[in-house]
Every structure is written in C-alpha cells, then in structure tokens.
Amino acid sequence: MIFSALTFLLSLFPFVTSAAESDHLFCGKHFLASYQDCDLDALGDVEGVVRALDDAVRASGATILDSCSYVFKPNGLTRVYLLSESHASIHTYPEHGSCFVDLFTCGDNCSSDRFDQILRAYLQPGTVNSRLLLRHTETEELVR
C-alpha cells in the first residue's frame, strides 16, 4: 500500500530521480593555479583578460550561465562565472604581475587542460603553480 502510494506520487513528478537513477556523477575536478611574472600589458588589459577567460571557459567544454566582474581601479579584475557544471574565476594583481585562476567542474566532461593552455597563451606567465583536485566522497590531488 505505501509502496504503491509512493510510486503514484513519484509518477506525478517525473523529474524527481534517485541518486542511483541519475545520469550525473558525484565527482568533480577542481583546477587551481597561480600565474606569476605575467605579461604586464596582457594582465593589465581588463577587456583582454575577460576575452581570454571567456575563451578558456568555453574551450574547457563548460557552459556559461552567467558572469560578474569587478574592476579594482585602475586595472585589477575579479571575474566569476556561474557554469552549468559549477564555477570559474580569476583574480588579477597587475601590480604584482600575477593572478589566481580557478575552474571547478562537476562530472568528467570538461577539460582544465584546455582552460589552462588558453590562459597561459594569453598571460605568458614566467612561473605557474597549479593543482588539479579530484573531488568526490574524498578529495585527492591528481598528478599533473
């Protein structure tokens, strides 16, 4: 009786599925990087950084839902993307020739390698410190 009532209720809401029935994996990849000794003209060009980051996010395979920016005068930038898969961000420090970038994507359909390649090509950092973390029931660092 209870089972049939539950089955009936669930049939009214076909979009409700259990974790076992979901097509989405409970896992994600979190790419974190610090780019130092960047090309100062590239890093200080707010519109150029935005274009490069837009290209990098799209090249990763992620779907941009929305974005928001704040410019710290004269040319420091924080930009955050809301992705269908999670989020991406950049925080620039032109006065230090450096920036922090972040790409977190759920599932396994996106590529942080492509994201990183495009940003490196634009910013031309002299030094890069990056990590790729696999997040699921535990968090572990993947060898890059």
Image (cartoon, rainbow, N blue to C red):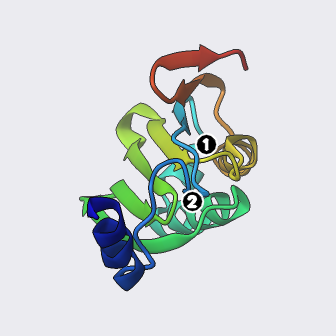
- The one nearer the camera, 91 or 96, is 91
Question: Where residue 94 sits: x, y (%)?
Answer: 41, 43
Question: Disc 2 marks which amino acid?
Answer: Leu
Question: Where residue 54 sits: x, y (%)?
Answer: 58, 67
Instruction: Please say whether residue 101 is visible from this viewpoint.
Output: yes
What residue is disc 2 on? 53
Instruction: Please say whether residue 34 is visible from this viewpoint.
Output: no
Q: In this view, does 130 lie to the left or right of 71?
A: right
What residue is disc 1 on? 39
Whichever of labels 1 and 2 marks the residue nearer the N terminus, that label is 1
Whether residue 55 is situated above or below residue 110 in the rendered picture: below
Residue pictured at 54% horizontal, 38% vertical: 27
Quarter of the image where one finds residue 144: top right
Please state which of the two labelled residues, at mark 1 or mark 2, is closer to the viewer. Answer: 2
Question: Where residue 12 sits: x, y (%)?
Answer: 35, 84
Whether residue 19 is situated above or below residue 38 in the rendered picture: below
The residue carrying pointer 1 sits among few (fewer than 14), some (14 to 19) or many (20 or more) residues within 10 Å by Cα, namely some
